[in-house]
């Protein structure tokens, strides 16, 4: 599993990074340049040892991060300490999170629901583990059935649709680095565990550059009305009604272009249809809306790179992990120049 994740992530990062050096056929006229002096994202967590991959915030402000399996972490999930910007605690405990024999094997996707439950998508065991952060107890596990995954599945990111009682995974596929992309949504009923693979290889999921990677970033608005998504190596944001996942034909019919974006590893959406984007090409946090198009919202602190996961909090900020994945040896002529600190940053939502 570690070798698989390492290889896939390296190739994915390389594909995205090299795009700035090569001309493509993708039109970029809708991405607006700016001459304004951009603000810098605020650092809320900084560590030499904890290298956050994705993050989740509960409604009462508790912050959790997964450690990307790419870096072979000893501890897979942390709760960051609210009174200390530099430390975290294995969550929910060492038995689940720490060591080779831990329950967690390869967690990247992590989200919190409105009830304070933390949902963890374990790629290694192909299941969701749902943990109540209020009582510190296991709620349930939800296996991902074998008939909805393929041999090249890459189950990294997902959304929770509380209105329709389901989780939706963005399966990018291409895990073997040889096959053509066959991305799809994996939709799982959170009450029954019933699962289905939907809209496989739909044009909206496919990369927009030759050799690029497919469906990856995915988000749902706070009212559970629309699901937003796109390809990692794509410059188009798509959206579809959350209700459409009841029927595959309706789902395919309802998918529509929404806007433009950079190549990105994560997106998040607020109640005003602002789509926040991790701009991995320029080490920035971007945003798209129908009024202003795509623009920079905040740049990363000096010397930092690769904004990864995004999460909108109830305090008026969007949070992002910053983990320098583009500086690993495989992308830097054999020399690993990724050095701490690794960060969680935030910037204010558009008003």
Image: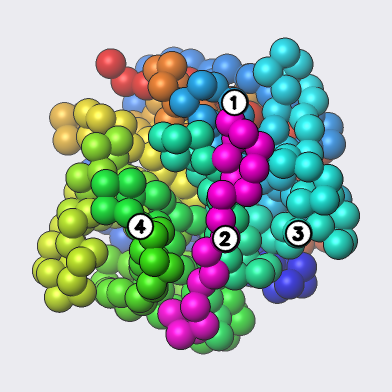
Helix, strand or loop under label 3: loop
| Cα gap from disc 3 to disc 1, whole angstroms | 22 Å
Q: Nearer the viewer, mark 2 or mark 3?
A: 2
Question: Over which residues does the magenta segment extend?
Answer: 131-150
Which is nearer the eye, 26 or 183?
183
Upstream in the sequence, badge 4 or badge 3? Answer: 3
Q: Which residue is mark 4?
A: 166
Name the residue located 52 percent from the left edge and 40 percent from the top edge: 117
Left or right of residue 159, residue 6 in this image: right
Whichever of callouts 2 and 1 sits on the residue coming sooner in the sequence is: 1
> In terms of sequence position, does the residue under pointer 4 or pointer 2 come before the other?
2
Residue position for label 1:
62
> What number is the disc on residue 103?
3
Residue bearing the label numbered 2: 141
Quadrant containing the C terminus in the rendered view: top left
Counting from the top left corner in percent of width and height, residue 21 is at 52, 55
């Amino acid at each position: 599993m570690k070798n698989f994740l390492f290889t896939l992530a390296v190739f994915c990062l390389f594909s995205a990074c090299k795009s700035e050096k090569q001309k493509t056929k993708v039109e970029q006229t809708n991405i607006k340049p700016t001459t304004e002096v951009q603000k810098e994202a605020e650092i809320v967590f900084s560590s030499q040892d904890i290298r956050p991959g994705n993050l989740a915030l509960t409604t009462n402000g508790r912050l959790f991060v997964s450690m990307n399996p790419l870096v072979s972490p000893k501890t897979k999930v942390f709760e960051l300490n609210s009174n200390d910007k530099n430390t975290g605690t294995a969550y929910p405990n060492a038995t689940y999170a720490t060591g080779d024999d831990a329950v967690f094997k390869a967690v990247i996707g992590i989200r919190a629901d409105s009830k304070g439950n933390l949902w963890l998508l374990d790629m290694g065991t192909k299941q969701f583990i749902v943990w109540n952060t209020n009582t510190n107890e296991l709620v349930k596990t939800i296996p991902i059935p074998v008939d909805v995954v393929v041999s090249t599945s890459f189950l990294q990111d997902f959304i929770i649709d509380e209105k329709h009682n389901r989780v939706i995974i963005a399966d990018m596929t291409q895990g073997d680095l040889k096959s053509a992309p066959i991305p799809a949504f994996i939709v799982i009923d959170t009450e029954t565990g019933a699962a289905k693979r939907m809209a496989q290889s739909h044009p909206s999921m496919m990369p927009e550059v030759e050799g690029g990677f497919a469906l990856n970033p995915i988000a749902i608005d706070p009212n559970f009305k629309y699901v937003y998504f796109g390809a990692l190596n794509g410059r188009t944001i798509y959206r579809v009604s959350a209700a459409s996942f009841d029927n595959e034909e309706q789902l395919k019919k309802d998918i529509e272009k929404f806007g433009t974006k950079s190549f990105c590893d994560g997106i998040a959406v607020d109640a005003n249809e602002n789509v926040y984007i991790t701009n991995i090409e320029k080490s920035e946090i971007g945003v798209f809306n129908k009024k202003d198009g795509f623009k920079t919202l905040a740049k990363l602190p000096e010397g930092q790179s690769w904004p990864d996961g995004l999460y909108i909090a109830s305090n008026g900020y969007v949070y992002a992990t910053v983990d320098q994945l583009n500086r690993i040896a495989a992308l830097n002529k054999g020399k690993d120049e990724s050095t701490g600190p690794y960060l969680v940053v935030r910037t204010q939502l558009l008003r």
